[in-house]
Structure formats: structure tokens, C-alpha cells
Amino acid sequence: MTLIGETAGAPASDAIKDGTDASFAQDVLDASRTTPVIVDFWATWCGPCRQLGPALEKAVLATKGKVKLVKIDVDKNPAYAGQLRVQSIPAVFAFVGGRPVDGFMGALPDSQVKQFVDRLAAAAGGGDAGDEVAELLAMAQESLELGDVGGAAQAFAQVLRADPENLKAIAGLARLYLQNGDAERAREVLQMAPEGAKDADLDGVKAALALAAEAGDSDTAGFQQRLAQNPADHEARLELAKALAARGNFAEAADHLLKIVEQDREWNDQAARKQLLTVFEAAGPASDVAKQGRRRLSSILFS
């Protein structure tokens, strides 16, 4: 099958079209508010693009209108590729409700491409929306417990197709981006939440982002060396905990903070206890870090 971007005639289907920077808002952002839209960033010189393109087209056509495909030549239309921080091609993004909710880079086997498209098509199907959202959120949680980060991300993305302002899905997807080291994308996902929205999981991701920003690129080696020389150096232990939390090592950070509280709960105006509560929030209220840490904190405070 010939790539649409290389065809002089009209697209084979209304579901597949060439896009440009000028038409992006209409073809992708606006269209995705009613039908999921896959954007394929490619170029004529890109070998993997030639491999991926036909598989995407075939899978999209098989959905019979439930999913659309917009192909964008990055050489001729660099603006939106730049905004989405596309660093290599092919780069594929799934848009729902005017926002990117899923994607991948590089050529995938045809079977995985079909699965990617079919997930979007399934989310576009009928059924009770409330039941579907609840089921997908349960699937996401189960995937997380099994260590299947990709499966969790896909489930959260499908929830956002059905309910673009679902706070649990927004928080879940943002946390996954943060855990993958992409704080900027996590912040972008959080912006999907309505202004003033309140949710424990949402607040947890915001706390995790704040911890990451606060500690910056702090080097843990220096603090560890100070502690090796003096285990009672609370300041070094606190800074080490902050650096660990910034990297997502909440359990280890909590352990260091609990040691400070255990040795001197009033030290520095209860700085360790206050930081500990932020770590619990960042880890998530239902996380083992929060549940076990609160039990240990209660044991220390009321012993």
C-alpha cells in the first residue's frame, strides 16, 4: 500500500487524510472531540515511516470510521511536531477531546499497531459510559499492580476518551509520565483537569511535581557521605530524603524522614514530619508508602 503522503490523488477514505500545520486545528483538535484521531508524523526519506504507514492505514480503515488518521510530513509542516517535542520519526499520537492521550515512536509490528488502533476504536464504541469508565479505571489499577505501565497508560487514555475531565485518569496518566521522567508532559496532562478540581490522586501528582522541582538535581552522594560520618546529621538526612523523593524514591525518602522523627520529632520546627506528609501525598494516599509510613509515624508519635 502506498503512503497517503506520497499519493498525488485523493485519499482512499475520508478516515485518512494528509494534514498540514494550517489544517491541524480542524483536522486533529476539533475532529478529535467527536472521533479519536491518530496523527502520524513522517517524512519521505524515513524508512521506518514507510514500514509503519501502511499498517496504520489498514488498521484505521478496519475500524470503519471509529478512528481517523491524519498524516503530516514534518519536513513541510514542522510547527506541531515541534510543539509535541517530536525528536524522531515516525512519531504517532492519539488525540481525544482535543488533547494527546497516547502514542508511540518508531515502527511497531503490524499486530501492535492494530492493537493500538483497536483500543481507540473500542473506546469510541457505545455502552454505558459510567460502567465503561469504572471498568477501565479498574483495569488501569490492575495493570499498575502487575507492573504493566503500558497497559495502565492505555486504560487511562481510554477513560479520557469517554470522559476527558476524569480526575482519576488525569492523575494516573500524569503520574506515569512523571515516573518516566517527563515532568513537563505530566504538567500538560494535569492541565486537562477543570480549574479548581479537587482529588486526592490529583493533589498527589502535584505534590510529587513540587518535590521534583524543589530538589532539582541534588546529588545524594554528598549527603550519604555526611551521614556515614555522622548518622545524627539530621540536615543531611533531610536533604537526602528530599533528593530521593524528587527522583520518585518515596519509600526510601520516607524511611530517612521517619528516622529523624524517631530521633528528634521537634527538630527544626518538625521539618522532617512536615516533609514526610508531603511525601505521603506525593506517593498517593492509597500507596504502601503512605499506609505503612503513617502506621510507623503513629507508632513513633504515640509510643
Image: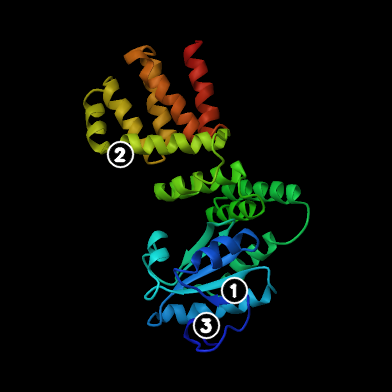
Q: Is residue 202 above or below residue 111?
A: above
Look at the image and tell me in which quarter the N terminus lies. Answer: bottom right
Q: Are marks 2 and 1 in contact (CB under 8 Å)?
A: no
Q: Which residue is mark 2?
A: 216
Q: Is residue 271 left or right of residue 144?
A: left
Q: Is residue 159 left or right of residue 128?
A: left
Q: Which residue is mark 3?
A: 4
Name the N-terminal-most of marks 2 and 1: 1
Q: Residue at x 75, y 48 (%)?
A: 131
Residue that extends furthest to the right in the rendered view of this protein:
127
Within-10-Å neighbours for mark 3: few <14, some 14–19, many 20+: many
Question: Disc 2 and disc 3: Cα gap in Å?
Answer: 45 Å
Please identify, in this view, whether the residue under mark 2 or under mark 1 is nearer the observer. 2
Q: Position of residue 150 (x, y in %)?
A: 54, 57
The quarter of the displayed image where residue 79 is located: bottom left
Label of residue 159 in the image: none
Amino acid type for the residue under numbered disc 2: Gly
Within-10-Å neighbours for mark 1: few <14, some 14–19, many 20+: few
What secondary structure is found at the residue carrying circle 3? helix
Q: Position of residue 18 (x, y in %)?
A: 51, 77
Q: Is residue 132 left or right of residue 79?
A: right
Label of residue 111 in the image: 1
What secondary structure is found at the residue carrying circle 2? loop
